Image (cartoon, coloured by chain):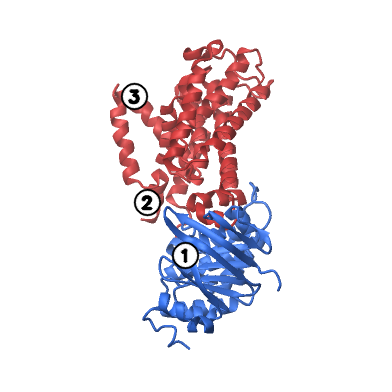
Chain colours: A blue, B red
Amino acid sequence: MAEPLLRVEKLVRRFGGIIATDHVSLDVAEGELHAIIGPNGAGKTTLISQLTGHLSPHSGSVLLGGRDITDLPAYRRCALGLARSFQITSLLLDFTAADNVALAAQAHAGTSFRFFANARKEKGLRDAAQAALDRVGLAHRADVLVSKLSHGERRQVELAVALASKPKLLLLDEPMAGLGVTESQGMVKLLQELRKEVSIVLVEHDMPAVFALADRISVLVYGRVIASGDPAAIRQNEDVKRAYLGDQHVVTHHG
Amino acid sequence: MKAITVSKAVTALMLAGLVLLPLYSQLSGNIFILTLFTRIIILALAAASLNLIMGFGGMMSFGHAAYLGIGGYAVGMLAQEGVGSGFIQFPVALAASAIYALVIGALSLRTRGVYFIMITLAFAQMAYYVASGLARYGGDDGLTIYKRSDFSGLIDLGNRVQFYYLCLACLFGVIFLIWRIVNSRFGLVVQGLRSNEQRMQAIGFPAKRYQLVCFVISGTMCGLAGALLANNTDFISPAVMYWTRSGDLMVMVILGGMGTLFGPVMGAVVFLLLEEFLSQITEYWALIMGPLLLLIVLFGRGGIMGALGRAGRG
């Protein structure tokens, strides 16, 4: 088997007495969309934060394309092709949408220790920003301050920012959080498109979306991966039904 | 839409006033006003440099007056040792300020928020006490500079008008540089870090090294103000580094409008004119000045520039 794009091995992270990540191992293959689901407090965001380098694990390792990145800071991982979106929208509110995305492009286009030339007039950066915004369907709002954008639009900017860094692996932390029904459908459609170009790790609560999109699903409960497999297998898995889905029939009645 | 906003008009008026001031001084024979405004311009330069890290970079440095002292002492100490050339004094003043900023910045930028404010303040107070201990250079009493920096006939700092224009040119030069910097790649990164550091790290920018470079640029600019200030007063003492002076600079920036190009200049002009004017009326001028500043800051969000911007729209 070829080397997976992302390999997580026996990752452990504790907060005081609580084990938020309990010996988690998982692989994400090139081109795969790997979803991570689990009830609230299962440790999904904690796991993502360790992948991006915002939190460091107590033990275990994270490998990107065979390279050990466990101890690299967030900005170095980003340079290696790891991009993330935040569960709670995290953007530069007093910058325009285009500026937000252009900065992400700038981070990957040569040095930023340039002090004199007007960066907003650099065609390469502006074009890259415009292309990424176009990709998420927000080109017409490029020059609006992010603080003036709606919640749904901000989620789209989050995605455009992640795309602008031309990542190999995209870590999406609940991209549908707080979106309305139509907005969610739009996002699913967008992710359908994106997955053709980039490998994705998707953390999401929206079950129909997850089962529609994922190649493989890992189920996280109390920091532990209790099951991992394709959507059909997960749907049949008794442990998953018992531990996570409970009485909700959201999975069984879908599809 | 009006093509010329109120804030732009007021700024242009103020700048024109600064350029024409020596003319007025000559015609009216009022030499005092020229001396006063030379000092205002030098402190406006210091405020503008503070604004680069505070307004654009979001780094609340409470020790900026230290650079005034370092720039000033570089000139004073060299003059004392018989090195009178401005071509040596000024570069030394800038280099000393840059090195101080590099060391202080590298240590201070490990902290954030209130701790950053306190640690920059602590370092500036340390510089103050070090200067007080320099017995050879006057210690507490300060050091008289008997001869202004000598630029070999290129420009005569002893001539009031020439010195005034040198200070004004330095101010305009620094504001031009700041304008280029804040719109450059580097400037956008620094402003992005002010806005959301976590996000900037996530898209691949190591925060600290950009902030440190910005801190050093700002300190160097303020060192220039220090060298000019020492020439203006023909005297340098630890008092220029005292923490209240750092506070004054912060007030000028906030009063004029943080994160605007000309706000600090506006703030310095208003602050120092008020101080001058009120202290002539009464000994207890600070009692009037304090509440007045409070009112401006409370009700004029974004300082004078912010208020003018609203007036333009209103």
Helix, strand or loop under label 2: helix
User: In the picture provided, is A225 more to the left or to the right than B86?
Assistant: left
Residue B178: horizontal and vertical position, in percent? 57, 43
State whether residue A31 is above or below residue B31: below
Upstream in sequence: badge 3 or badge 2 = 3
Residue linked to disc 2: B311
Number of other residues with Cα within 10 Å of mark 1, as a class: few under 14, some 14 to 19, many 20 or more: many
Q: Nearer the viewer, residue B190 or A53?
A: A53
Helix, strand or loop under label 1: loop
Q: CA distance from mark 2 to mark 1?
A: 56 Å
Which quadrant does the N terminus of chain B fall into?
Answer: bottom left
Residue linked to disc 1: A223
Q: Residue at x 41, y 78 (%)?
A: A242
Q: Nearer the viewer, residue B30 or B96?
A: B96
Residue A77: horizontal and vertical position, in percent? 62, 57
Res. B169 visible in picture: no
Same subunit, labels 3 and 2: the answer reads yes
Circle 3 chain: B
User: In the picture provided, is B125 more to the left or to the right than B280?
Assistant: right
Residue B227: horizontal and vertical position, in percent? 57, 25
